[in-house]
Image (cartoon, coloured by chain):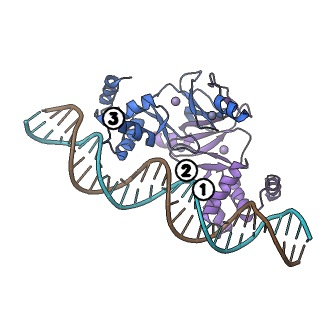
Chain colours: A blue, B purple, C brown, D cyan
Amino acid sequence: MDHMDYSAQMRDLGLRVTRGRLAVLDALESHPHSSAERVVIAVHQTLPEVSIQSVYNVLNDLTEQGMLRRFTPPYSAALYETRVNDNHHHALCTSCGRIEDVECAVGHAPCLTPSNSHGMEIQLADVLYQGICEDCRKTDAA
Amino acid sequence: MDHMDYSAQMRDLGLRVTRGRLAVLDALESHPHSSAERVVIAVHQTLPEVSIQSVYNVLNDLTEQGMLRRFTPPYSAALYETRVNDNHHHALCTSCGRIEDVECAVGHAPCLTPSNSHGMEIQLADVLYQGICEDCRKTDAA
DNA sequence: CCTCTTAATTTGAATCTGTCAAGATAAGAA
DNA sequence: TTCTTATCTTGACAGATTCAAATTAAGAGG
Ligand SMILES: [Mn+2]
Ligand SMILES: [Mn+2]
Ligand SMILES: [Zn+2]
Ligand SMILES: [Zn+2]
């Protein structure tokens, strides 16, 4: 996704195209699964004048409009990414905190059907795998 | 689970058996998926002298020892429950916030195998279904 | 039972993450 | 270029949780 695509998408959503919004999208494009704080740091590389509050505003607005995805691993601030609508999952290393994308075999939501959903109409299945990554296994063994 | 079981389990783990710990376990037994704040309220029904900090300590210690399970739905404080080791999942109503247990068809972790785990040794698959519960569908329709 | 060790708890401050609200600024329609 | 108002900035504030030091009490050992 480049600036033109993002700009068009924002206009379609009735959102104004601003430097801050594009910078946040850029930051998350090159650093997926970033916290608000890390997005601020990345944005400040090119636009030091953007306020922290503004980054929060952008993250909330774009998430609300479906241009960003937010998820909250245990013991972590909320993380954001630009990959949306592909229903992919995540794998978290409980040792070093690394997070990897895991492709969804089904590819659309909800990819899993619960046995008994208590009458709920399921729209989404968020899956967070937890385990130990290869690097940590090697380090632990040593 | 009654007090005797919990006490034995704590001793086996090398933990001292205290009124506060038993009260927290009782609270979560009768009010599963409670936040720390709600646990405090429940505990204070019978033990008003227990401090908030102590409840946090107990929740952390027992979660660390595997006697409690913690999970973090989006836009929510951490929630706790006494059901552990059965790898059950959760369904969250995005309208009213209700949370229901969803039995795991497989029954043990990890119940799902990711297509490509990037070398990670997966130990757990946390699944959070999101949708609209029956009550909210009726209300929304009206 | 006592005594003693130290795990657990209390208290109060502090941190982290994020929100609220009011005024200033700038996107983009006309 | 003008004008409307969405967006941004600033500063205060809130919620959830943690930190640290002093106090209390669980339970092992005598
Ligand atoms: Mn991802
Ligand atoms: Mn549950
Ligand atoms: Zn790792
Ligand atoms: Zn509902």
Q: Is residue A121 visible?
A: yes
Q: How far apart in space, not on screen, are marks 3 and 2 (Cα)?
A: 34 Å
Secondary structure category for the residue under label 2? loop
Crowd tier of the residue under label 2, counting other residues whose Cα lies within 10 Å: few below 14, some 14–19, many 20 or above: few
Q: Amino acid at mark 3?
A: Thr
Between residues B109 and B14, which one lies in front from this camera angle?
A: B14
Residue A109 shown left or right of residue A40 in the figure: right
Residue highlighted by disc 2: B77
Between residues A60 and B132, which one lies in front from this camera angle?
A: A60
Q: Position of residue A40 (x, y in %)?
A: 40, 41
* Same chain for the residues under marks 3 and 2 in the image: no
Crowd tier of the residue under label 1, counting other residues whose Cα lies within 10 Å: few below 14, some 14–19, many 20 or above: many
Does label 3 point to a residue whose CB lies under 8 Å from ligand 1?
Answer: no
Q: How far apart in space, not on screen, are marks 3 and 1 (Cα)?
A: 41 Å
Asked if disc 2 and disc 1 are in contact, CB closer than 8 Å, the reply is yes
| D9 over D24 or under it: above or below | above
* Same chain for the residues under marks 3 and 1 in the image: no
Q: Amino acid at mark 2?
A: Ala
What is the total number of numbered labels drawn onto the structure image?
3
- Tell me the number on the disc at residue B36: 1
Secondary structure category for the residue under label 3? helix
Residue B63 shown left or right of residue B74 in the figure: right
Q: Residue at x 34, y 23 (%)?
A: A5
